[in-house]
Image (tube, rainbow, N blue to C red):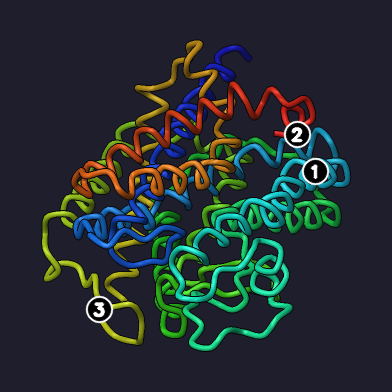
């Protein structure tokens, strides 16, 4: 039992690296091309576009995969009803707090600094603009009307929705126990999964290009262009848990997949647009199909490869890694306002935009973990909740 527990330290370590990558990704949103962000710097770093593309191809899918891994055991131990109640409290309460307080404040600062409208106080903005109770201003600059959204907390919203679906399916399923059969994953299963996700992504992007967000069922904030990956890897995380795939993945095969992923990353960074149609956002064409395939292949190769790499090479634990891993959830919740604050602070500092990005990324990681561990988690109810 001790051996199995020790084996799972690599999941915590992988989550630490992933959340740092998420912070760096969002730090670059103010300084890179494409995509809406709460703060807009005039000068842009063009190569950040490729950085965003590579990240978006895999890192949130890997988060969904790892987040789903422990859910079957949790439902088995607690039962679907108790499991669902705890998920609603653990995810739903922070989600509601962010939706009602954090995101409106961020959007308000964007409204008064980057929109050419008459400055208003927060309360009229909150009622009339964020929730859309007033009339839409003329020449509304978007990105949508009203400003009401979940922002980066869309990930928590999806986790909550998927947990509800999983709990319902488990409740009505005749199989009440988790069967950890240690069944090795077969490569033909991987190939078929890559093909299926590629086709689903290609079809969806005919109507929904990358960076287009909508509300599924009117309230589930979703980017349909990446939804096939997210749903698929959440489902694969459930399967991996019941079949012990994370512990039984062949090491040699895992490193081969990692090498494939690294090669694809290098091609995307240095191969030029001729090898990868960056500018094609959607439509039924070969460019869109090739992009869907390359992103899906990159996603599967890095998910498999990074899991094996961390399992074999980064499977230890120390006081620092234990502290960092315990703060991952809170860091995800608070890192965006921390980054936006830093981006505003660097506005008038006479340094290059590259230096602004690097400083924002580094300080964003440090401050987010610092605030989480030494401030946020010291609040009694918050500590219990998060």
What's the mark number on residue 198? Answer: none
State how far apart marks 3 and 2 are (Cα): 46 Å
**Earlier along the polypeptide chain: callout 2 or callout 1?**
1
Packing grade of label 1 (10 A; few <14, some 14-19, many >=20) is few
Location of the N terminus (image quadrant):
top right
State how far apart marks 1 and 3 are (Cα): 44 Å
Packing grade of label 2 (10 A; few <14, some 14-19, many >=20) is some
Packing grade of label 3 (10 A; few <14, some 14-19, many >=20) is some
Residue 143's x, y, as percent? Answer: 49, 74
User: Which SS class for mark 2?
Assistant: helix
The residue pinned by badge 1 equals: 89
Q: How many marks?
A: 3
In the rendered image, the vertical position of residue 239 relative to residue 272, given as above or below:
above
Tell which of 152 and 298 is nearer to you: 152
Residue shown at the point (54%, 19%) measured from the top left: 323
Location of residue 384 (image quadrant): top right
User: Which SS class for mark 3?
Assistant: helix
User: Which SS class for mark 1?
Assistant: helix
Instruction: Tell me whether the residue at label 2 lies in contact with that at label 1, contact meaning CB atoms closer than 8 angstroms.
Output: yes
Residue 70's x, y, as percent? Answer: 65, 37
In the rendered image, the vertical position of residue 151 relative to residue 355, given as above or below:
below
Tell which of 164 and 182 is nearer to you: 164
Residue shown at the point (20%, 43%) measured from the top left: 351
Residue 298's x, y, as percent? Answer: 32, 54
The residue pinned by badge 2 equals: 385
Location of residue 41 (image quadrant): bottom left
The residue pinned by badge 3 equals: 287
User: Viewer-nearest of labels 3 and 2?
Assistant: 2
Instruction: Tell me whether the residue at label 3 lies in contact with that at label 2, contact meaning CB atoms closer than 8 angstroms.
Output: no
Q: Is residue 90 left or right of residue 136?
A: right
Residue shown at the point (48%, 87%) measured from the top left: 139
**Earlier along the polypeptide chain: callout 3 or callout 2?**
3
């Amino acid at each position: 039992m001790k051996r199995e527990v020790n084996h799972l330290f690599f999941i915590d370590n992988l989550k630490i690296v992933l959340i740092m990558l998420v912070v760096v990704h969002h730090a670059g949103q103010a300084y890179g091309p494409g995509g809406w962000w709460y703060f807009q710097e005039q000068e842009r770093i063009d190569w950040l576009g490729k950085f965003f593309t590579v990240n978006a191809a895999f890192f949130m899918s890997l988060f969904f995969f790892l987040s789903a891994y422990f859910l079957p055991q949790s439902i088995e131990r607690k039962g679907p009803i108790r499991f669902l109640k705890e998920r609603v409290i653990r995810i739903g309460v922070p989600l509601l707090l962010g939706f009602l307080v954090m995101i409106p404040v961020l959007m308000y600062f964007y409204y008064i600094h980057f929109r050419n409208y008459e400055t208003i106080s927060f309360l009229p903005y909150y009622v009339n603009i964020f929730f859309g109770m007033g009339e839409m201003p003329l020449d509304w600059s978007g990105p949508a009307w009203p400003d009401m959204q979940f922002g980066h907390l869309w990930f928590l919203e999806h986790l909550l929705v998927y947990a509800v679906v999983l709990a319902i399916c488990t409740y009505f399923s005749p199989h009440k126990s988790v069967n950890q059969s240690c069944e090795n994953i077969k490569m033909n299963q991987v190939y078929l999964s890559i093909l299926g996700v590629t086709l689903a992504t290609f079809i969806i992007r005919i109507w929904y290009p990358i960076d287009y967000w909508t509300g599924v069922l009117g309230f589930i904030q979703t980017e349909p262009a990446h939804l096939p990956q997210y749903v698929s890897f959440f489902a694969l995380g459930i399967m991996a848990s019941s079949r012990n795939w994370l512990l039984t993945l062949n090491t040699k095969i895992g490193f081969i997949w990692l090498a494939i992923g690294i090669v694809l990353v290098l091609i995307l960074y240095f191969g030029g647009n001729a090898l990868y149609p960056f500018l094609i956002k959607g439509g039924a064409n070969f460019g869109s199909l090739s992009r869907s395939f390359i992103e899906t292949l990159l996603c599967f190769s890095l998910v498999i490869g990074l899991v094996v790499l961390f399992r074999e090479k980064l499977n230890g634990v120390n006081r620092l890694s234990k502290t960092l891993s315990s703060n991952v959830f809170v860091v995800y919740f608070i890192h965006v306002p921390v980054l936006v604050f830093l981006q505003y602070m660097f506005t008038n500092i006479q340094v290059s935009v590259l230096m602004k990005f690097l400083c924002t990324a580094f300080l964003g990681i440090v401050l987010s973990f610092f605030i989480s561990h030494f401030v946020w988690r010291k609040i009694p109810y918050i500590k219990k909740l998060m």
